[in-house]
Amino acid sequence: MKNKKPKLTIISPSLNTGEFLKETIDSILSQSFRDFEYIIIDGGSADETLDILKDYSQKDPRIKWVSEKDKGYLDAFRKGLGFAQGSYIMNCSISDGYLDKEWFQKCIDILDNDNEVSLVWGLQQYKNEDGLLGDCGDILCSQFYKVMPPQKTEFIYYWLVTCFVLPEQNFCVRKNIFNECFPQYDNLNDEDRKTDSWLEFNYNFNTRGYLSYFIQTKASFARVNEGRRSQKEEESGIIYSRFRNYTKKIIDYQKKMIFGVATHQYKNGAGKLLPYKFHRFYITRFILKYGLVPTNIVANLSRTGYLRYIKKSLPGIYQLGRRIFRKKTL
């Protein structure tokens, strides 16, 4: 009898992250939904990572891993994607994990029962290096902590006016859509590219007409620790350059929609056209409703690391802005 393929695949690139590995694995194993495989692609760690992986994989066959040198995060993730057997894909960085023990089940329920939806996402809360969770002001996409975002066919208008980035740390995507929208780079060196793979995925996913669905729960956590990949990208300035390229592409697409140069078409989870019409004049309505709202501007700046730059360079202004922001979201 052939082994039954899992419904869900979670992929984690890894390199010398043994300090946080157990917490990440435990958060995945504590999920109520059990029909998954967890693939860790290790880049040849020299710390305790391999001992931990050997121990956990012997106890739970859903945990699969490979350890060999690679060309960086993207190379490792693509390797994991090649091994994936699940119908749905999730990404989980080592040192991150899941807070809502029903998160996998909630994502599966939506994707199994609504074939128009291709991606499910939720809120993410930051942890400091000591493992302590922050408050409301430390939630990624905190503008949706109490207020729901536009859903499905209306989300494209919000994206066009805010350049929003769907949080790859917790979203769950249909594998066929992921393979279509995740970029195929010839150059796998993470530091040489002018675009970020997850920003490129966001752009492709939205412009190709696929629909997302938000669940209002703190789905996952992300640890803010020294030496993480995103911190290095912030310090080098790469992350800001990539985000500017991302926003420029979105603005160009927005102009094509406004002036009727191109037509936006919606697609379901199988890539088939849906009978819904895109109304280009709705863009102005969403600019007024969302584009000029301070909480949206601040939250989206936080998503790309700009607020951490302000916190470091202008701490007084950062603290003042944070107090104002918290009053509006609590």
Image (cartoon, rainbow, N blue to C red):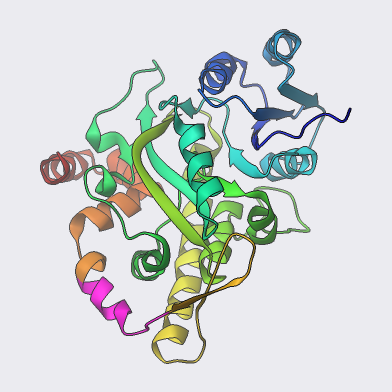
Q: Hey, which residue is sitting farthest right in the picture?
A: 1
Q: Position of residue 137 (x, y in %)?
A: 24, 37
The residue under the point 26% across, 67% down is 291
Q: Position of residue 49 (x, y in %)?
A: 68, 15
Q: Position of residue 2 (x, y in %)?
A: 87, 31
The residue under the point 21% across, 53% down is 295
- Please say if 71 is above or below 207: above
The answer to whether residue 237 is visible is: no
**Within the image, what quadrant is residue 287 found in?**
bottom left
- Please say if 207 is above or below 64: below
Q: Quadrant of the N terminus?
A: top right
**Within the image, what quadrant is residue 11 found in?**
top right
- Please say if 157 is above or below 182: below
**Helix, strand or loop: magenta stretch:** helix
Q: Position of residue 205 (x, y in %)?
A: 55, 62
Front residue of 252 and 169: 169
Q: Is residue 146 left or right of residue 186?
A: left
The answer to whether residue 42 is visible is: yes
The residue under the point 14% across, 38% down is 330
Which residues are the magenta region? 278-288
Front residue of 35 and 193: 35
Counting every numbered tag in the picture gives 0
Q: Is residue 301 left or right of residue 241?
A: left
Q: Is residue 117 magenta?
A: no
Q: Is residue 203 left or right of residue 191?
A: left
